[in-house]
Image (cartoon, rainbow, N blue to C red):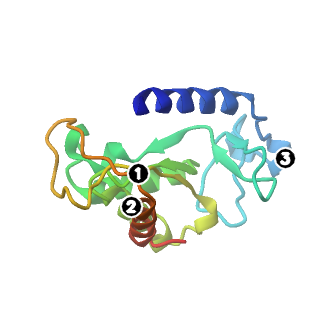
Amino acid sequence: QLAALLLVVLATAAIAAAALPTTTAADCGSADACDDWTVVSRSSAPLGCAKQRTLNGAADGRTAVSEVGFGVWSVATKWWGVEDPKDGVRLLREACNQGVTFYDTADVYGNGLGESMLADAFWKNGVARDQIVVATKFGYDIYSNKGERSGHSELPQDFSAAFIRSACDERLKRMETD
């Protein structure tokens, strides 16, 4: 049931994202070297050029994310060939330099490694926290089930209020943010 719900949520998010207005170069300033790509604010950015979408309903009314996101699982687990976390941090930084501002992670990605890598790649290297949007998830109990998993085996899940609070606190510590 949970997997079906997740698929519905992801499909709904994809449909909603497709309906969001694309920010244009006129909205952001000169596109100079970016051709038809939108300029991400250069005033405060190590970020490059990337097509952005403004999130409707955002509290500030102007939060934008890159149309292309980075799935941190690909660099936080050894399943996909990235053996050294330093290589993962380098790839995250390069994505940021190319204008990627949306990063999807979870505590289960490398038992928290993915979240720690975000801190190492960004805020410890001068990228302002408000330039990056992070989506994260919870539910798998990585705290009672430590160690590297083999294959795609499921971990026990916990959706109790106490676990959710604890998981959120732990991820904020790993990401070194609020």
Q: Mark 1 vs mark 3: which is more N-terminal?
A: 3
Q: Between residues 8 and 18, which one lies in front from this camera angle?
A: 8
Amino acid type for the residue under numbered disc 3:
Asp
Q: Secondary structure at mark 3?
A: helix
Q: Are marks 2 and 1 in contact (CB under 8 Å)?
A: yes
Query: For the residue carrying disc 1, how many other residues have a C-alpha within 10 Å: few (<14), some (14-19), or many (20+)?
Result: few
Amino acid type for the residue under numbered disc 1:
Phe
Residue 84 image position (x, y, % from top left)? 22, 55
Q: Secondary structure at mark 2?
A: helix
Residue 106 image position (x, y, % from top left)? 40, 51
Q: Determine which quarter of the picture holds residue 67.
A: top right
Q: Is residue 174 left or right of residue 136?
A: left
Numbered tag placed on residue 37 in the rendering:
none
Total numbered circles: 3
Q: Mark 2 vs mark 3: which is more N-terminal?
A: 3
* Mark whose residue sits in front, 1 or 3: 1
Query: For the residue carrying disc 3, how many other residues have a C-alpha within 10 Å: few (<14), some (14-19), or many (20+)?
Result: few
Q: Is residue 131 left or right of residue 20?
A: left
Instruction: Give the alpha-carbon distance from disc 1 to disc 3, as whole Å.
Output: 42 Å
Residue bearing the label numbered 1 = 159
Instruction: Give the alpha-carbon distance from disc 2 to disc 3, as whole Å.
Output: 42 Å
Amino acid type for the residue under numbered disc 2:
Phe
Numbered tag placed on residue 163 in the rendering:
2
Instruction: Give the alpha-carbon distance from disc 2 to disc 1, as whole Å.
Output: 6 Å
* Mark whose residue sits in front, 2 or 3: 2
Q: Are marks 1 and 3 in contact (CB under 8 Å)?
A: no
Residue bearing the label numbered 3 = 27
Q: Secondary structure at mark 1?
A: loop
